[in-house]
Amino acid sequence: MSDIADALRVTDPNFDLSSIDPQSTPAYDGKKADGEDDLADGADHLSELQERLFASSKAGSTRSVLLMIQGMDTAGKGGIVRHVVGQVDPQGVQITGFKAPTDEEKQHDFLWRIRKAVPEPGMIGVFDRSQYEDVLIHRVHGWADEEELERRYAAIADFEKELHESGTVLIKVMLHISREEQGERLLERLDRPDKHWKFNPGDIDEREHWDAYQHAYQLAIQKTTTDASPWHVVPANRKWFARLAVQHLLTDALESISPEWPKADFNVKSERERLIATGDVPEAE
Amino acid sequence: MSDIADALRVTDPNFDLSSIDPQSTPAYDGKKADGEDDLADGADHLSELQERLFASSKAGSTRSVLLMIQGMDTAGKGGIVRHVVGQVDPQGVQITGFKAPTDEEKQHDFLWRIRKAVPEPGMIGVFDRSQYEDVLIHRVHGWADEEELERRYAAIADFEKELHESGTVLIKVMLHISREEQGERLLERLDRPDKHWKFNPGDIDEREHWDAYQHAYQLAIQKTTTDASPWHVVPANRKWFARLAVQHLLTDALESISPEWPKADFNVKSERERLIATGDVPEAE
């Protein structure tokens, strides 16, 4: 088990979000250059674990991993996908971004679109935002009342229990940035023409609800962190640390499955003979 | 335009597949180590082009790219996805593998499942096998008669014309290996337990139809290579060259679109003032 993963796990039902310093690098002594080196060094191991997971599904394993990423605007969700998930074979990855629900999605329970995106056996699923939006933005803007929010926390807990029982390892990540850091990152999006497409005037409106969002996150985390599907609050002011931390979480999740190369379901010796008999097999003795 | 891409393009309607040496490296003088370096060196440019393509779709561009990969078993289709497509942000990639059609798919025209997988605006789509299976394996095994095969070539040509007109740049790639190379690669899958999961006894059965497949490929390429959607036959005995070549093809396709960073659809100056007024924006003057 990675020390970093361990340090970021939320177990306290009275967890206080403001106790986590977004600038900190829990259980990691290195600086930026070290963190970038360690991220690069971890790629091969992560990639082999992913390939084993994928391979094992071909032999009937139903195990999968789901990395669920939450965070305020500019927290670095996309960067995690690009720099961490991007280290493994894209054929083994299913990425879903959850934006404002479509008309069709609105006609169903909030978990309907979520269930449709659950990763298939052997895959690493990635949720960029998730079921939690329905207890975050909905709480902040009062689109759901307290009773409905309580129903949703319970529905989410049931859903995550189901996922766990069906063999999906769920990694719940909150990328935790400070209000100052968000201010700088939004400013950068305004000051760099190649970043303009990432800016949405609505981001500033949401920023005005900063404290309400922090409160909504804290409540959601308190109510839905469990032994089987704990939350991890990842200090994310330093992008390099957040990426290294999520790489550790993903590696841990795959190691907990410990996927094995499938055994051959054919007779290797007789297939070998059959192959050689076709001719043009230069290296065969 | 890349010299390699240029050298691999099929323009001759009487194209002879056997004239292409699978061991060759057209328009490239380097050796393996050079090829690997050049592949790594091209990653940043490819990745920026992909991000621009993705960004431009947020401003209404409908352009996309579709990389379609065909080849005999073990030709290296998966390796292309992993090592070339894997160089760009996985959020901008839609990968579809076409295996034997499902019962539902069989109830529709052969292009039905293909159309459903066409990339959305801003995306790089990847087809691992494609519409061409219906004129390759079907021809080899006589599952379709000559008249039906001719109908399919025409339907494919119409479909690809539509794609072109709708703004999708289609890259058609045949990874071309020798029968000896396939023999060695199949043997490796049998001799390495971590590769057993990739082996299917049916691969040896298909190998017995080698010449019929080469003929079916040649016909398909002759009948469907066009100025707008040409085939590229990529010598693929040397994996490093095939990967470098496909990187060039993908880069060329993106350069032909030449996607620009979208212009802001908001007032940058007033948004900047609005942001600074929220407070906690340390770097703002």
Image (spheres, coloured by chain):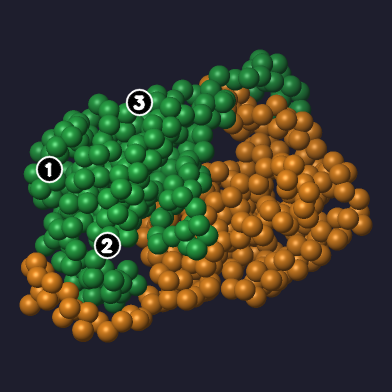
Chain colours: A orange, B green
Label 3 Cα crowd, 10 Å radius (few <14 / some 14-19 / many 20+): few
Disc 3 and disc 1 on one polypeptide chain: yes
**Above or below — where is B136 with respect to A102?**
below
Q: CA distance from mark 3 to mark 1?
A: 28 Å
Q: Earlier in the sequence, mark 3 or mark 1?
A: 1
**Above or below — where is B40 with respect to A3?**
above
Q: Residue at x 73, y 57 (%)?
A: A111
Q: Are marks 1 and 2 in contact (CB under 8 Å)?
A: no
Q: Could you say which disc has been placed on residue B16 in the image?
A: 1
Q: Is residue A235 left or right of residue A18?
A: left
Q: Are marks 3 and 1 in contact (CB under 8 Å)?
A: no
Q: Earlier in the sequence, mark 3 or mark 2?
A: 2
Q: Is residue A136 left or right of residue A284?
A: right
Q: Residue at x 74, y 21 (%)?
A: B274
Tell me where residue A64 appears, x and y as whole percent. Answer: 54, 67
Residue A234 is drawn in which quadrant? bottom right
Q: Is residue B145 left or right of residue A59?
A: left
Tell me where residue A263 appears, x and y as whole percent. Answer: 36, 81
